[in-house]
Image (spheres, helix red, strand yellow):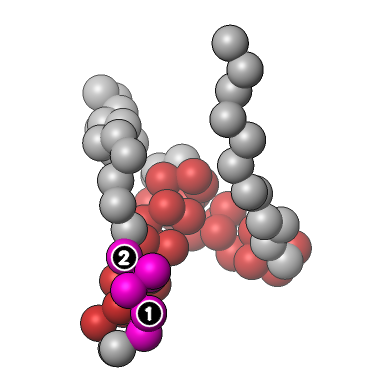
Amino acid sequence: MAQALYYSPRLERPLIAALYHAAKAKRIPMTRLASLLVREGLQRLSQSGASESCVVHEETPPVIDPRGR
């Protein structure tokens, strides 16, 4: 069965470096931190009167790491 393709934008290198160091400091995966930051940013946009398309609809619940990361 073919997998769905998702748009995956490239982030600027300085953002990747900052994300890497912030995730290491918080001891969480970069993907979890990136998702959290994007989700919070989209919520702020929708609260400030921006387009309704900024609302995040969860497809699946977030993965909880049993190791507490």
Residue nearest the observer in this picture, 6 or 29: 6
Residue at 59% of width from left, 64% of height from top?
18
**Callout 2, which amino acid?**
Val
**Callout 1, which amino acid?**
Ser
Provide the residue designation for mark 1: 51
Q: Residues within 10 Å of mark 2 (few under 14, many from 20)?
A: some
Q: Which of the 4 image quarters holds residue 4?
A: top right
Residue nearest the observer in this picture, 13 or 57: 57
Q: Residues within 10 Å of mark 1 (few under 14, many from 20)?
A: few
Up-down relation of residue 34 to residue 5 (above or below): below
Residue at 63% of width from left, 35% of height from top?
5
For the record, the magenta segment spans 50-55
Q: Residue furthest bottom?
A: 49
Residue nearest the observer in this picture, 39 or 22: 39
Give the label on residue 40, or none: none
Q: Quadrant of the N terminus?
A: top right
| Magenta-span inclusion, residue 51 | yes
Picture coordinates of residue 19 (x, y %)?
55, 59
Up-down relation of residue 8 to residue 69 (above or below): below
Provide the residue designation for mark 2: 55
| Magenta-span inclusion, residue 2 | no
Picture coordinates of residue 22 (x, y %)?
48, 59
Picture coordinates of residue 41 (x, y %)?
38, 72
